[in-house]
Image (spheres, grey):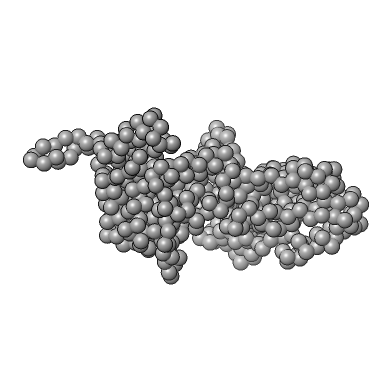
C-alpha cells in the first residue's frame, strides 16, 4: 500500500518550509531510514527520512519551493501501484489540474506541472496600450516595459504582445507568477517539460551597457527569508531611531571584576559586556511596560514577563532567538542562557519556535564588537522596539567645576514603532537603559 510523505511541522509557529535538496527522484528505490529531502524553516534545517521501503512514485514539489506544513510532499509505494486516489486530493485543493492516471506507467508530478495558478497581475499601466493587448499581456505575465509599440504614437497593440510571446519560451504557471512579481524573464531555453521555462530558469534582463561583466548568483533560502522579513518590517510600520551614549566606566570596571571572578572560580561563566547591557535592558523594561509589548494594529499586547530576543550572526544568516522569562535570571544565569542560544543557532539545532518574532517581546542587536559607531536596527514585528548596541568610544564629559575629560561611552540606538510608542516614552526608556548601565550592580 502506498505511503504519503507529508511536510513535517517543526514547531507551533512554523507555517511553511523551503525544500533545499531532493535526495531522491521519481522511480528511485527507497530504503527505510534513507533521507528523502532536506528542508529548512525560519533559519533551522532538517532532513526527512523514509518511514518505509519502496519506490518513489510521485513528488509534488521541486527544490526551492515553499511548502505548507502537513502538505503532501511525496508518495512511496510499489512500482505499478495506482496512486490516483492519493494524488487527486492534492490537485483538487488547488482548483484544477490533472491528477496522475493508472494508465501512465511512471507518474511524474513536480512543481512545474502542478495545477495552474491564478494569473498574476503585471504592470500594464502608464503606457499607451490597447485593451486587447493589455488583456493578453496580463494573461501571459508580460510587462509592458519589455514591449515596443508599433501602433499610432507608439501605442502597444495585440500584435506586439503576440510577437514578443513568439520569441519567448513557454513558461510554467509558477514561472509566470515569479516573472511578474520579480521583473525577471526566461532564458533562451527552458529546462521543463517540452522546453517550458521553469521558475529556476528565470533571470534578470541583461543590461547591454555592461555586457556580461558580472555574475548572477542565486540567493540562499535564508537570505530570501531575511529579505522578506526586513522588507515587511519597514513597509508595515512607522520606524524611528533615537541615539544616545551611556557612560561605560562602571560597566568596564565590572567586566574586569567578572574576568577575575572567572579566573578564581567564583563564577562558572564568562560575563561579557553584552550580557551586562542585556541585564540593564531587562531592568529598564520592568520600569517601562509600554515598550515590552507587541503592536497588533488596533490593540497592544502587554506581557507580564520579559522574553528577550538576541540577534546572532551565523554562517547561514542572522538569527534572533528568544530567551523566555529573562527577567527571572541572575546576571550569571542570563549569560549562560544567551550563550547556549547563540551556540544552538550556529549549529543549526535551535528550536524554530524560539526564532519566531512573536516569541520575543524586545530584541537587542549588538554590533559593538565590529567597531560600529552608530546604526539603525530594524524592528522584529510585531515587537514595539529594538535596541542597537554600538562600540565604546571616548567622549568629552563635564566632571564638575569646569573640568572636562574624555570618558568611554557606549552607543545605544533605539528603533521604535511610532504607532506603538510616542517619542517621549521612547526617549525616557532609552535614557533609563543608559542609567541602568551607569549604575549597574551585579553580584558574584
Please name the residue shown 76% across and 65% down the image: 92
- Up/down of 9 relative to 208, above or below: below
Q: Is residue 208 visible?
A: no
Q: Can you give x and y, in whole percent of width and height, for residue 344 in the image? A: 54, 42
Query: In the displayed image of the protein, which residue is found farthest to the top?
Result: 263
Q: Can you give x and y, in whole percent of width and height, for residue 133 in the image? A: 63, 62
Q: Is residue 441 visible?
A: yes
Residue 239 placement, left or right of 149: left
Q: Can you give x and y, in whole percent of width and height, for residue 334 in the image? A: 42, 45
Please name the residue shown 11% across and 41% down the image: 400
Q: Can you give x and y, in whole percent of width and height, for residue 413 in the image? A: 33, 47
The one nearer the camera, 386 or 103, is 386
Please name the residue shown 27% across and 52% down the image: 431
- Up/down of 264 relative to 248, above or below: above
State the image quarter where residue 155 is shown.
bottom right
Q: Quadrant of the N terminus?
A: bottom right
Residue 153 placement, left or right of 61: left
Residue 273 placement, left or right of 73: left
The one nearer the camera, 227 or 117, is 227
Q: How many marks?
A: 0
Query: In the displayed image of the protein, which residue is found farthest to the bottom?
Result: 298
Q: Quadrant of the C terminus?
A: top left
The one nearer the camera, 146 or 310, is 310
- Up/down of 263 relative to 292, above or below: above
- Up/down of 291 relative to 321, above or below: below
Please name the residue shown 73% across and 55% down the image: 6
State the image quarter where residue 28 is shown.
top right
Amino acid at each position: 500500500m502506498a505511503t504519503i510523505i507529508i511536510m513535517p511541522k517543526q514547531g507551533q509557529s512554523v507555517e511553511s518550509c523551503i525544500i533545499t535538496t531532493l535526495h531522491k527522484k521519481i522511480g528511485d528505490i527507497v530504503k527505510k531510514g534513507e533521507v528523502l529531502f532536506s528542508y529548512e524553516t525560519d533559519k533551522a534545517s532538517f532532513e526527512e527520512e523514509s518511514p518505509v521501503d519502496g519506490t518513489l512514485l510521485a513528488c509534488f514539489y521541486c527544490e526551492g519551493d515553499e511548502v505548507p506544513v502537513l502538505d503532501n510532499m511525496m508518495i512511496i509505494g510499489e512500482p505499478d501501484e495506482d496512486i490516483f486516489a492519493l494524488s487527486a486530493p492534492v490537485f483538487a485543493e488547488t482548483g484544477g489540474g490533472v491528477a496522475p492516471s493508472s494508465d501512465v506507467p511512471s507518474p511524474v508530478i513536480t512543481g512545474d506541472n502542478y495545477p495552474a495558478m491564478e494569473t498574476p497581475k503585471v504592470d500594464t499601466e502608464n503606457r499607451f496600450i490597447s485593451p486587447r493587448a493589455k488583456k493578453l499581456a496580463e494573461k501571459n505575465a508580460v510587462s509592458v516595459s519589455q514591449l515596443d509599440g508599433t501602433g499610432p504614437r507608439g501605442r502597444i497593440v495585440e500584435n506586439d504582445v503576440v510577437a514578443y510571446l513568439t520569441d519567448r519560451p513557454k513558461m510554467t504557471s509558477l514561472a509566470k507568477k515569479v516573472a511578474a512579481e520579480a521583473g525577471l524573464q526566461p532564458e533562451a531555453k527552458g529546462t521543463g517539460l517540452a522546453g517550458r521555462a521553469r521558475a529556476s530558469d528565470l533571470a534578470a534582463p541583461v543590461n547591454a551597457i555592461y555586457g556580461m561583466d558580472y555574475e548572477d548568483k542565486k540567493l540562499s533560502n535564508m537570505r530570501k527569508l531575511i529579505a522578506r522579513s526586513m522588507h515587511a518590517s519597514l513597509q508595515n510600520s512607522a520606524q524611528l531611531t533615537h541615539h544616545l551614549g551611556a557612560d561605560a566606566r562602571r560597566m568596564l570596571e565590572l567586566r574586569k571584576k567578572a574576568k577575575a571572578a572567572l579566573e578564581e572560580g567564583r563564577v562558572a561563566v564568562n560575563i561579557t559586556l553584552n550580557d551586562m547591557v542585556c541585564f540593564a535592558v531587562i531592568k529598564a523594561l520592568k520600569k517601562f511596560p509600554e515598550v515590552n509589548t507587541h503592536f497588533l494594529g488596533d490593540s497592544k499586547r502587554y506581557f507580564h514577563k520579559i522574553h528577550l530576543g538576541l540577534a546572532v550572526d551565523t554562517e547561514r544568516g542572522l538569527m534572533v532567538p528568544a530567551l523566555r522569562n529573562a527577567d527571572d535570571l541572575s546576571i550569571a544565569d542570563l549569560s549562560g542562557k544567551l550563550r547556549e542560544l547563540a551556540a544552538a543557532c550556529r549549529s543549526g539545532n535551535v528550536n524554530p519556535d524560539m526564532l519566531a518574532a512573536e516569541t520575543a517581546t524586545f530584541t537587542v542587536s549588538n554590533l559593538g564588537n565590529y567597531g560600529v559607531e552608530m546604526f539603525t536596527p530594524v524592528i522584529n514585528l510585531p515587537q514595539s522596539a529594538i535596541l542597537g548596541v554600538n562600540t565604546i568610544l571616548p567622549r568629552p564629559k563635564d566632571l564638575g567645576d569646569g573640568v572636562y575629560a574624555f570618558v568611554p561611552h557606549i552607543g545605544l540606538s533605539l528603533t521604535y514603532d511610532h504607532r506603538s510608542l510616542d517619542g517621549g516614552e521612547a526617549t525616557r526608556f532609552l535614557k533609563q537603559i543608559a542609567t541602568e548601565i551607569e549604575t549597574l550592580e551585579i553580584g558574584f
